[in-house]
Structure formats: C-alpha cells, structure tokens
Amino acid sequence: MTHELKQIVNAHLEARNLGLKTVLVTVVALEGSSYRRPGVRMLILEDQRMVGAVSGGCVEKEVMRQSASVFIDSIPKMMTYDGRYRLGCEGLLHLLIEPFSPPINSLNAFQYCIKERMHIQLNSYFKTNEREYEGMGTIMKLKGEDFYVNQYARVNTQLQLFKQNLAPCFKLIIIGAEHDAIELSSFANALGWEVTVIVHPADEKEITDFNDGITLSSVLAEQMDVSGIDHQTAVMLMTHSYAKDLQFLIALQSVNSCYIGLLGPNKRREKLLNEFLEHCPEVASNFFDRLYGPAGLDIGAETPQEIAIAILSEILSIVRKRTPVLLRDKIGGIHQ
C-alpha cells in the first residue's frame, strides 16, 4: 500500500500547485468481507478527479457525493457503506473522509522516507457512529515526528484508532534487458513496485526501451552497487548469458534480498550453482534459501508476458507467505 500512498501524495502536490483542495478517504474498519481491506486510501480532487480506489468501483460514486461537504467546511466525516444489500462482498465499510492538507514540511519528510526506504506509520482517529466530527483525522509519523493530515486531527484516546505501519515500497531489480526483461519490468511497474533494470555495458539498451518510472543502470557485475538491496527487494537474473549470470550471481552473494530468481531449466541452474560454489565456497547457507530457479509458478507460461506473470506471482506468494492454491479450493475467506 506504500506505493498507493506515494501516488496520493504526488497527486496532492500537483493539485496544490494548481490551487485545488484535496480530500483523503481511508477505509478504517470493515465488518464482513470487501474487495479491499482497511488501510486502503484514495484522494479526491476539488475538480472531481480521483486517485486510487477504496473498492472495485462500486463505492466511489457515493464517496464522491459524501466528500462534497468536506470540501466546503473542511470538517472530517464518517461514511458507512453497506454492501450487504448492494454488492456481492457482503461487507459493511467504514470510511474516514477528511481534508488532505498536510504542511509542506511533512510532505518533504514523506519524500525523504520513501527515498531512504524508511517505515511510515499512520494513525487514523475516528468514530463509526459519527457523521461529522472535528476531532477525527489521520496523523502521519515520519522520521519519529507526528504530522497532521488535517487541522482537526489530534491524538484522542476517546476515539477509535486504526493504526497502520507501511513498509518501504517493494523493489524489483532485473538483471538483463532482453524482451522478456522488458515485459517483466512493465508488469512490475504496473504493480507499483520500484523497478531497476541492470544491463551490461555491451548491451545496446536505452531508457526509452522501458516504461516511465523505471531506472536503467549500465554496469559490470563487479561494479554493481548491492548496498541498497534489502529484504523488501527481489532480484531476477535473466541476462540470457551463462557467463554474465554467473558474474552477477557472484556479485549478489552477500545480499539480503527476499528472492533471487534464475531463468532457465534445472540443468542450467545446477551447473550455474556448482560453478558459483567454486568461486564462493564460504557463502552463507541461507543464501540458497532465497534462490528460485527455474523462476516462476507452473501456470503453463509460454510467452514473455505469461512468463512475467508467472515470475511476479511467485514473488508475491513468497513475500505474502502463501502457498499458491486455487481460490475455489481454499477453505475459509480469501484474505484469511
């Protein structure tokens, strides 16, 4: 959800420069089931544009209507949407609608936290049985300091509290720039992941070959900076060159990524790892726990686009600690 909040803040900054007010909508409580869970947010601009969504699209029209009074009087309000009679989700959504007018220094602090990959905490104070109430609102904790989203937001132990801790944006590092790597970077970018593509200097690839928002780095394996690779990072090794894959794998021997994917069949993986061990005999044993090759879930993928879906699905299952299963065969709720 961090990337969604990042989009909201960027949209607010653009609206601010245009002199437009903005309103933040947060799902703070849920009874039953819903398309999205508490913590999802959207931004409404004064010109009625929306950034993000709090449902599959069925709630947003009512949210837009309810936000009108907040634009006028700047007083936070609660909205309850009963989907039990209108939707298939059978859930009761409680949404906090508040002016989004954080001080500029808080937005600078937010951008710093995003860049430095720091955790962000949000505390939303609300009353489910209130329509309008000046004491409600969200507080962002950034770099250890509290910043109020609206002028009325205060710490109030008499109110209900929805607390959310957001991890840094998930990052994907793709080593290689062939057609399948371009497709993978595009799909990952659409997920809101921070994507960096690393290419060998001999590869003739330009940033224009990739979608906007993707970082391209042209370096040799021994020059690659691995200091920023943390547990919120996945690495996909797909140069289509055995020698290059080996060089980059050696460069990755000390990283703490949650995932390192290897493209190619089992035979190629075994040969690669055997030679890797000859170069790095003292590598930590848990390094191999993070290796996944052949990369991807077995969904019968054939095309570069399908292979990208298979790889991203495997990464998500590992990050979310899920064993892939058909939802129709799962016992219990989808999100349990």
Image (tube, rainbow, N blue to C red):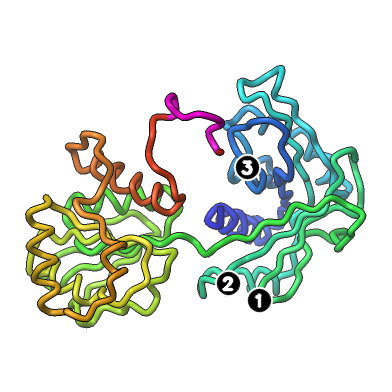
Q: Amino acid at mark 3?
A: Met
Q: Which residue is mark 2?
A: 113
Tag 2 near tag 1, CB within 8 Å: yes
Question: Quarter holding the C terminus?
Answer: top right
Q: State the residue at coordinates (64%, 21%).
A: 87
Residue 311 location (% of width, % of height): 29, 48
In the figure, is residue 221 to the left or right of 2? left
Tell which tag, 2 or 3, sits nearer the viewer.
Answer: 2
Secondary structure type for disc 1: loop
Q: Earlier in the sequence, mark 1 or mark 3?
A: 3
Residue 75 location (% of width, % of height): 88, 49
- State which quadrant residue 255 falls in: bottom left
User: Label 2 to label 3, Cα distance in Å?
Assistant: 24 Å
Tell which tag, 1 or 3, sits nearer the viewer.
Answer: 1
- State which quadrant residue 82 falls in: top right
> Which is the main secondary structure of the residues drawn in magenta?
loop
Residue 128 location (% of width, % of height): 84, 40
Examine the structure image and report whether residue 69 is included in the region drawn in magenta: no
